[in-house]
Image (tube, rainbow, N blue to C red):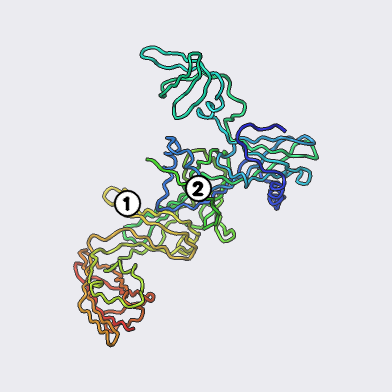
Amino acid sequence: MKRFKNRTIVSVSATVLSMSAMATVGASASDQADEGPSVTVYSSADPRGFDPQQFIAQQRQGYNPTSAQQAPGFGVVKEVRQIKLEAGINELPFTDVAQFIDPTTVSFTDLTDPEGTTVLEQNFQFDLVSPEKILEKYLDRSIRVIVPSGDSTEVVSGRLLSASLGKLVLQTDQGLRVINGHGYSIELGELPESLMTKPTLVWKVQAKNAGEHRIRTTYQTNGITWRSDYNLVLNQADTMADLGAWVTLMNLSGAGYENARLKLVAGDVQRVQPRTPAFPRRGVMAMEADVSVGFEEKAFFEYHLYTLPRRTDILANTTQQITLFPTARDVKVQKTLVYYGLPQARYWNFRSSPQQDRNLGNRSNPKVDVYVQFKNEKSNNLGMPLPSGKVRVYKQDDADGTLEFVGEDLIDHTAKDEKILIKLGQAFDVVGERTQVSFNLDTNRKTITESFRIQVRNHKEQPQKVIIKETLFRWATWKITKSSDEYEKIDARNIHFDVMVPANGEKTVTYTVRYTW
């Protein structure tokens, strides 16, 4: 077999045979598959901080060529090719594979003759052509350097001793010559044979039967991921909305996949990650709709699999958007106003003794939060598991018919029949005020009695329904001894008052709580 001088990762027969045997499971079902690539993309992207354009910009500007390996996700690439094998030992080079392959995941399966073809060795060659690598190959060899000198140029010939950080060291007939800067040009001979222009997988296989064989290869690659984005358009009454969904696919794997079958996996898939140094960064729905418009969804193990029912081109070094599902029309939504007068209380955990500082309860937040909620169920023209992503909400301006942005929030992976709550911002014309009316600490009786007055003022021409949220943070044992309005106990720490605030009016809620320990 040919010996490879360039960088090569080699997997010998024992490992590959094991992987190949695993890949053969279910091979009969794949025998009828069309030739070409199939790509399944797994994502661990956090919609809050993941920006595909950041990775694209770094790749294009050359700031961090290895940043693609840090993309939050990976792909499993499967490809079926028709090749000709001779009886005996064959060496099969496959080009146009991803640059960021995990070589330990590569498998090779002969779909035509799985019992008669044996993989003996596989190699991943990734020493691609670059100016630096070419100069490395010319160390101790003669080169010519054309150096600018004022309005003319100087030709320097000699044996290359070093090439680093834009500096060249040459052994010339006159002695050592150091050439600084990047304005020079270099004349070389032929490209060294051990350099390649594309990443290449090379298999050494032994075939029993000669002829045309259908070969399936599978490998994992970094540098490819996806995220979902949603657009929610509210009606004028904020009671109905249309929901559209997109998949943003980013491919920096170092290869393109033309006419590919595409699948996406949503869910928290565990993957063992090696320790790597940190690199610096510079600077439906109507269910009866035509499903061919978007992805087809199904449960898969403990995750969800989204399959595009048509082929698509996954181009190298690009982001592209694909419809996740047809726009869901007339989704019932509910706008909700929530006043949380002491929001920091959510972070105060119970200690070994009660919170006895009276000043903890006398702060007041004037802002009223605005939410939109809906249920992801079939009767609401939805009912598909929704991958985590960012939801942008718009509303039409009657004056000119244009859509105006009113807020955005993140959602986690959401199963069907679950509620979705989206925070849009804070109300302008509805404000709140929370006042600690009394505080009494009795250490002998081990009690704290505390009273509050909560006022919500509505400056709109229409009455507003507001949820007043209160956290009982001082101790785990508490009792509401007096209340002006009915309340709902949400959990061990929180209660809600659902109130209606009149137009251009005010609503006041008072209550007293007693803690004992």
Q: Are marks 2 and 1 in contact (CB under 8 Å)?
A: no
Q: Which mark is residue 405?
A: 1
Q: Quadrant of the N terminus?
A: top right
Task: Specify whether 283 is left or right of 287.
Answer: left
Q: Residues within 10 Å of mark 2 (few under 14, many from 20)?
A: few
Q: Position of residue 153 (x, y in %)?
A: 41, 13
Q: Which mark is residue 276?
A: 2
Q: Foreground: 164 or 33?
A: 164
Q: Foreground: 104 or 412?
A: 104
Q: Quadrant of the C terminus?
A: bottom left
Dot 2 lies on which element? Answer: loop
- Please name which of the two marks, 2 or 1, marks the residue nearer to the observer: 2
Q: Position of residue 301 (x, y in %)?
A: 59, 60
Q: Residue placed farthest to the top in the image?
A: 152
Dot 1 lies on which element? Answer: strand
Name above or below for residue 250 compared with residue 272: above
Name above or below for residue 261 compared with residue 147: below
The answer, for residue 502, to whether it is visible in the render is no
Q: CA distance from mark 2 to mark 1?
A: 40 Å
Q: Earlier in the sequence, mark 2 or mark 1?
A: 2
Q: Which mark is residue 429?
A: none
Residue for point 24% across, 79% down: 451
Residue for point 49% across, 53% down: 44
Name above or below for residue 467 compared with residue 115: below
